[in-house]
Amino acid sequence: MNHTSMSDETLIRYYLNGDPTAMATLVELYKDRVYRSIYNMVQDKNAAEEIFGKVFIRIINNIMSGKNAEEGNFLQWAIRIAQNLCVEHTRNIKLSIVMSIAETNEPGAYALTHNVTHTNYYDCHNKIKSLIDMLPDDQREVLALNHYGDLSFKEIADTMKCSLSTALDTMKFGLRNLQKLMMEKEIILQ
């Protein structure tokens, strides 16, 4: 049976009725966009692969417990789960860094244990990501869904359950606030 022509909802129904190839089809349909959004957020291949696996495990667990994406929103649902797992991953990394700093009393130990060479691109990228983290939740979410999730503003509006104009306004305010933060912190993109 050719699953690629079926809707996401039909594939989920087939999966729930015992057809594992239906889930494999969903993974195949969306794996590139979901993986790309994860990688863009974490900038680490190993972490991205680990998170990618967790996304579809969480989706399967949600489906099995009766929680599904709203009709026609499987991709947005998968990217939102990916985004949440990326945030969780980032928090865990920050926590482990803070804990490793707290465990040592030696001055400069942090610099020795985390002395990683980055290119200017990664330095700028990391600075911008830290500034985005300072934005209000709705602005941060719109920026992440658009830039990292590669979603259109219509898809963002559907995901956030708001109007298209609200999604666009939120992006505008987020970019304006990001620009202000960059000026305050004197960050210049090269």
Image: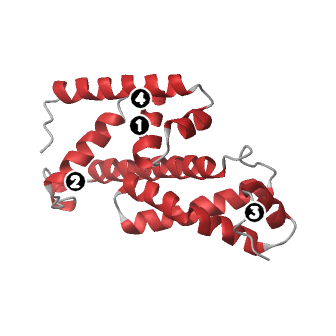
Q: Which residue is mark 3?
A: 6
The amino acid beneath tag 2 is Tyr
Tell which circle, 3 or 1, labels the residue nearer the N-terminal end.
3
Q: Nearer the viewer, residue 22 or 65?
A: 22
Q: Of the residues shown, which amino acid type is indicated by label 1?
A: Leu
Q: CA distance from mark 3 to mark 1?
A: 31 Å
Q: How is the image coloured?
A: secondary structure
**Do callouts 1 and 2 mark residues in contact (Cβ within 8 Å)?**
no
* CB-based contact (under 8 Å), mark 4 and mark 1: yes
At mark 4, the secondary structure is: helix
The residue tagged with tag 2: helix, strand or loop? Answer: helix
Mark 3: which secondary structure?
A: loop
Q: Residue furthest front?
A: 5
Q: Residue at x 60, y 26 (%)?
A: 162
Q: Quadrant of the C terminus?
A: top left
Alpha carbon separation for disc pair 4 and 3: 33 Å
Q: Which residue is mark 4?
A: 171
Q: Secondary structure at mark 1?
A: helix
Give the amino acid type for the residue marked by disc 4 in the picture: Met
- How far across and how far down the image is residue 99, in percent? 35, 50
Q: Amino acid at mark 3?
A: Met
Q: Position of residue 168 (x, y in %)?
A: 46, 27
Q: Residue at x 49, y 45 (%)?
A: 151
The number of numbered discs placed on residues in the rendered structure image is 4
| Closer mark to the observer between disc 2 and disc 4 | 4
Front tag of 4 and 3: 3
| Residue identifier under label 2 | 122
Residue position for label 1: 143
Q: Nearer the viewer, mark 3 or mark 2?
A: 3
Q: Is residue 17 above or below residue 95?
A: below
